[in-house]
């Protein structure tokens, strides 16, 4: 995948590339809701429970699964038919996630030090290199910024994505169908296979952190993104897809009451592994609604803005919760818990907005402009010929 052209890109092209992310605005809006259930998950487990809401979001860590599926979907939709060299793609992804990772990891380490917890150099280096999820060591996985473990998985997804786009199996409707079926069956199989792992910590690492395991969700998203891009339409509409997601999380409530999280067949890992096909249906339904021009309630101006802030919110919120707990302590009453939740949500979301506006977005544009460019549309790269039925979404 050589970059042999000498044609110089324009700043306008770079700006339009970033602006084009909202061609499917409902997907951007959904990012906020996925981040929200992760935030509520951490508030419930670290600060205290609010009846009803905490039960429904007790396994809100599944929001990360949504992001993994969405990542595969959007990248496949974006780069299908695009002649983008792999090194350009990887630089774009680096520019997208690394600046904010550095800033939030520095803030997280500062909070750890302020509350008297030691952070090892190994954990910080592994986080900045985005390899920390590969280690079955909680100190390395969570040492710098606990929420950033998922970026290690994303970095792995980005490395394999150019190869995935070259697979002949993904070029036909039947092939994509069988890829989706295989990924779904594999996710169920991995969950059942965890019964063979006796050590709880090892089981959690292999099912919840290990990049090759999480890759199944990303590949499912890739197959879904290519299917929608090339004309396939899901029979499940957006209201039904949202209903399935809600019912799935509500079904986890009695499951949690019946089975402790320490057992392999508890809903802890199941909620993250088995939710991927449901989230794939949700993403497909939302994308289809946008393609039809339907009003979804997810693509308004504020919904899109909050969706833009979701990545920063994901990386910032746990730091804010940790700092507030260190200063004020864990609330003892329901009113105190509700007040703590409100302050943590508002403060972390405000910081996320500032981080997006002043760190994430400007540094991404700066790095993209400074790095390698896709200069020649005819140059060999990812994807194949763009089908006549496909649309366009520039993101990456």
Image: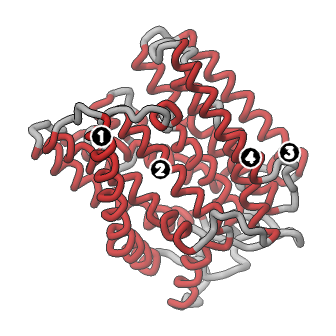
User: Mark 1: few, some, or many residues within 10 Å (few <14, many ≥20)?
Assistant: few
Query: In x, y percent, where is residue 266?
Result: 54, 17
Name the N-terminal-most of marks 3 and 2.
Answer: 2
Colouring used for the render = secondary structure
Q: How crowded is mark 4: few (under 14 residues within 10 Å), some or many (20 or more)?
A: many
The mark nearer the N terminus, 3 or 1, is 3
The residue tagged with tag 2: helix, strand or loop?
helix
Front position among marks 3 and 4: 4
**Depth-wise, is mark 3 or mark 1 nearer the camera?**
1
Which is nearer the eye, 155 or 63?
Answer: 63
Which of labels 1 and 4 is toward the front? 1
Q: How far apart are marks 3 and 4 (CA)?
A: 24 Å
Which is nearer the eye, 4 or 229? 229
| Residue 114: image location, x then y, percent | 10, 46
Q: Is residue 375 left or right of residue 142?
A: right
Q: What element carries label 3?
A: helix
Label 3 and label 1: CA atoms lie apart by 54 Å
Residue marked by disc 2: 36
How much space separates mark 3 and mark 2, taking CA atoms?
A: 35 Å
Relative horizontal placement of residue 236, taking residue 340 as reference (left or right): right
The numbered dot on residue 241 is: 4
- Image point (59%, 75%), residue name: 3
Location of the N terminus (image quadrant): bottom right
In the image, residue 199 sits, relative to residue 164, either above or below, namely above
The earlier-in-sequence mark between 1 and 4 is 4
Q: Mark 1 points at which residue?
A: 335
> Few, some or many C-alpha atoms within 10 Å of disc 2 (few <14, some 14-19, many ≥20)?
many
- Tag shown at residue 175: 3
Q: Earlier in the sequence, mark 3 or mark 4?
A: 3
Q: Which mark is residue 188?
A: none
Question: Would you place residue 270 above or below residue 110 in this image?
Answer: above
Q: Are marks 1 and 2 in contact (CB under 8 Å)?
A: no
């Amino acid at each position: 995948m050589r970059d042999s052209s000498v044609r110089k890109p324009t700043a306008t092209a770079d700006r339009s590339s970033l602006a084009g992310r909202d061609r499917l605005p409902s997907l951007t809006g959904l990012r906020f809701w996925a981040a929200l259930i992760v935030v509520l998950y951490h508030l419930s487990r670290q600060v205290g429970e609010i009846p009803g809401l905490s039960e429904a979001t007790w396994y809100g860590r599944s929001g990360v699964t949504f992001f993994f599926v969405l990542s595969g979907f959007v990248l496949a939709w974006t780069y299908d038919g695009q002649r983008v060299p792999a090194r350009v793609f990887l630089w774009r992804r680096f520019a997208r996630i690394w600046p904010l990772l550095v800033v939030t990891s520095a803030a997280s380490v500062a909070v750890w030090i302020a509350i008297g917890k030691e952070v090892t150099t190994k954990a910080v280096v592994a986080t900045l290199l985005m390899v920390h999820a590969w280690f079955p060591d909680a100190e390395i996985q969570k040492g710098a910024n606990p929420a950033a473990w998922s970026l290690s998985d994303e970095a792995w997804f980005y490395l394999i994505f150019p190869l995935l786009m070259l697979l002949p199996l993904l070029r036909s409707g039947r092939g994509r169908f069988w890829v989706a079926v295989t990924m779904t069956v594999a996710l169920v199989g991995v969950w059942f296979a965890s019964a063979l792992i006796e050590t709880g910590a090892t089981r959690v690492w292999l099912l919840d952190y290990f990049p090759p395991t999480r890759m199944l969700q990303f590949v499912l998203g890739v197959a879904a993104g290519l299917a929608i891009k090339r004309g396939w339409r899901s029979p499940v509409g957006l209201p039904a897809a949202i209903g399935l997601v809600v019912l799935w999380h509500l079904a986890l409530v009695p499951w949690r009451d019946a089975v402790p999280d320490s057992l392999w067949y508890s809903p802890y890992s199941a909620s993250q592994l088995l939710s991927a096909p449901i989230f794939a249906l949700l993403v497909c339904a939302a994308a289809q609604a946008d393609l039809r021009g339907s009003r979804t309630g997810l693509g308004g101006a504020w919904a899109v803005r909050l969706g833009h802030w979701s990545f920063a919110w994901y990386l910032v919120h746990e730091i804010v919760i940790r700092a507030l707990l260190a200063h004020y302590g864990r609330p003892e009453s329901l009113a105190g818990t509700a007040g703590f939740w409100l302050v943590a949500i508002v403060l972390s979301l405000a910081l996320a907005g500032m981080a997006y506006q002043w760190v994430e977005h400007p540094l991404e544009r700066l790095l993209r402009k400074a790095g390698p460019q896709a200069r020649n549309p005819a140059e060999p790269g990812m994807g194949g010929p763009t089908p006549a039925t496909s649309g366009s979404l520039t993101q990456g």
